[in-house]
Image: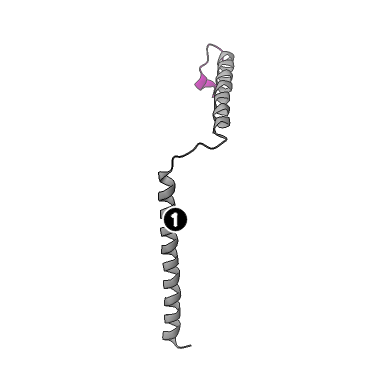
Amino acid sequence: MEPWKDFSARHSHYLAHYLELLAEAERERRISAVLATRPRKAPFFAPALAALGRRLIIWGSGLRARYDEAVPDGLSRRQID
């Protein structure tokens, strides 16, 4: 193959690929614009996650209270850690 034909073939291939990438980016931008205007609905598991978070906070507070009582009065938490 002639060098200029090879260059021309590569150039048209890269140009076609570039145009495909531009079209895909435009599609993604349009999809994002449509999705951004819709109100977001909480996923079905959001209440379960919220309940789990509350339970973890209660559990962590209980652990802190229990182990803060276990620290002797003469020591501070920093000395133990």
Pinpoint residue 34: horizontal percent, then vertical percent. Answer: 42, 49
Q: Quadrant of residue 15?
A: bottom left
Could you tell me what secondary structure mostly forms the magenta stretch? loop
33 relative to 2, above or below: above
Query: Mark 1 highlights which residue?
Result: 28
The number of callouts visible is 1
Image quadrant in which the C terminus is located: top right
73 relative to 56, above or below: above
Q: Which residues are magenta?
A: 71-81
80, 10: nearer the viewer? 10
Q: Quadrant of residue 44?
A: top right
42 relative to 61, above or below: below
52, 71: nearer the viewer? 52
Label 1: how many residues lie within 10 Å, few (<14), some (14-19) or many (20+)? few
Pinpoint residue 51: horizontal percent, then vertical percent. Answer: 57, 27
Pinpoint residue 76: horizontal percent, then vertical percent. Answer: 50, 17
Pinpoint residue 52: horizontal percent, then vertical percent. Answer: 58, 28
Picture residue at 45% right of the left edge, 61% below the top: 24
- Outermost residue toward the top in this view: 73
Is residue 75 in the magenta section? yes
74, 15: nearer the viewer? 15
Is residue 65 in the magenta section? no
